[in-house]
Image: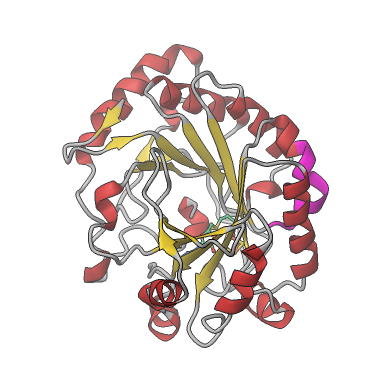
């Protein structure tokens, strides 16, 4: 099992497979994706070796992210490869949902078990203003397709934005009243590129937790391998709520995740300064032991906190690069 010097163990890998995205969310890629010179993104064989090494070291949950993971033509093949890796018991992805309606079933059949779909507003004009795309109906149809395809977990992610969607709480709650969907509210995080935006639009997660508690929502206890969200349930709702509050005291104490970027860099934290290049160790099946040794040793460099409160953003210019 991978563990660090602060008593934390790591069983959850967030793997980015591309930096490319077709959306231009105002807090992430306001000018859209611009191609950068340099090496291409991890290939299928490199992804397979990486997953094998992590799974051998006790990682049982992998989330495929990006950029937009579904822009890759071999996305279904990547799902198949990861889901067939011995030891991987939970395979999830986070997507903007633009290909979901047509692919929900084939991804499920390929082995995808859980899905998070980003929807920052259920009002079409606000959805368009945030993402740059008029595709809310398609994305909603994609969520329904996931429910029909019997995913083990369907979640909707919304980043809280002052004056944009912070008054939409009622609409978000209505969406989960009769659907077995978990609505995740994510507190906007400051990155290297969005400092001004952050100052203008950041909403503390406590605004939502206070409203939920006033409304009778009850906090659930954390399950093993769970992500960073604090979960809430309510007797009148089929669905649930998750709140991701990275600025909360002790957020890093329960950290159980590691990240690998689409370029094959290991990031011990979303806000770590430097990624460690794994790619030279992903070139042949014979390198498995060396890769596992490198991963085990790297854990001791993991720092105790992201120090976001001190304005630290590390090497994270935007989430599309490392994978949110
Ligand atoms: N393209 C996919 C999507 O949007 O779901 C996957 C990648 S995206 C980077 C993953 C998640 O990170 C999304 O839910 C997005 O809203 C969130 N995100 C991006 N930038 C963020 C920021 N600065 N603060 C908080 N969440 C952010
Ligand atoms: Fe693309 Fe996701 Fe970033 Fe939006 S949040 S620009 S969909 S990577």
Task: Name the residue at 30% across, 52% down.
Answer: 272
Residue 265 visible in this rendered orientation of the protein: yes
Number of marks: 0
Q: Residue furthest top?
A: 286
Q: Is any part of residue 74 visible from this angle? A: no
Extreme-front residue of the structure: 235
Task: Give the magenta range.
Answer: 97-106
77 to 133, vertically: above or below? above
How is the model colour-coded?
Answer: secondary structure
Of 65 and 159, nearer the camera is: 159
Looking at the picture, how far across and down is residue 205, in whole percent? 39, 72
Q: Would you place residue 123 above or below residue 263 in this image?
A: below
| Residue nearest the viewer, comparing 243 with 173 | 173
Quarter of the image with the N terminus is: top left
In magenta stretch: residue 100: yes
- State which quadrant residue 23 falls in: bottom right
Residue at image position (50%, 79%) is 161
Relative horizontal placement of residue 104, taking residue 302 as reference (left or right):
right
Q: Which residue: 33% across, 49% down?
A: 269
Residue 177, quarter of picture: bottom right
Residue 116's spot in the image, x, y percent?
59, 52
- In the rendered image, residue 121, in percent from the top left (x then y), is placed at 63, 74
State the image coordinates of residue 247 (x, y, percent, origin top left): 30, 67
Look at the magenta stretch and give its main secondary structure. helix
Query: Which residue is pictured at 71% across the width and 37% down the height?
Result: 108
Farthest residue, direction left: 5
């Amino acid at each position: 099992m991978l563990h660090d010097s602060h008593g934390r163990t790591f069983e959850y890998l967030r793997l980015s497979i591309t930096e490319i995205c077709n959306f231009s969310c105002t807090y992430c890629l306001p000018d859209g994706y611009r191609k950068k010179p340099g090496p291409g993104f991890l290939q299928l064989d490199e992804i397979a070796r990486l997953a094998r090494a992590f799974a051998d070291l006790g990682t049982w949950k992998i989330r495929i992210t990006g950029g937009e993971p579904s822009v890759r033509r071999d996305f279904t093949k990547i799902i198949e490869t990861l889901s067939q890796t011995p030891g991987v018991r939970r395979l999830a992805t986070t997507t903007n949902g633009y290909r979901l309606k047509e692919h929900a079933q084939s991804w499920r059949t390929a082995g995808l078990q859980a899905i998070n779909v980003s929807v920052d507003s259920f009002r079409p004009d606000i959805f368009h203003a945030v993402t740059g795309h008029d595709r809310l109906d398609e994305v909603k149809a994609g969520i329904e397709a996931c429910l029909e395809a019997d995913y083990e977990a369907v979640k909707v992610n919304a980043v809280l934005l002052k004056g944009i969607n912070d008054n939409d709480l009622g609409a978000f709650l209505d969406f989960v009243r009769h659907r077995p969907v978990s609505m995740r509210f994510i507190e906007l995080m400051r990155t290297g590129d969005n400092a001004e935006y952050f100052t203008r639009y950041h909403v503390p997660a406590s605004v939502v937790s206070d409203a939920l508690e006033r409304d009778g929502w009850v906090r659930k206890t954390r399950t093993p391998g769970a992500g960073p969200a604090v979960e809430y349930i309510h007797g009148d709702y089929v669905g649930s709520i998750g709140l991701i509050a990275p600025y909360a005291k002790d957020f890093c104490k329960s950290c159980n995740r590691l990240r690998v970027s689409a370029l094959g860099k290991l990031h011990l934290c979303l806000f770590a300064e430097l990624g460690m290049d794994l790619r030279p160790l992903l070139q042949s099946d014979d390198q498995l032991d060396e890769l596992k040794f490198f991963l085990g040793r790297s854990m001791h460099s993991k720092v105790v906190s992201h120090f976001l409160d001190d304005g630290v953003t590390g090497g994270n210019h935007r989430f599309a690069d490392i994978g949110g």
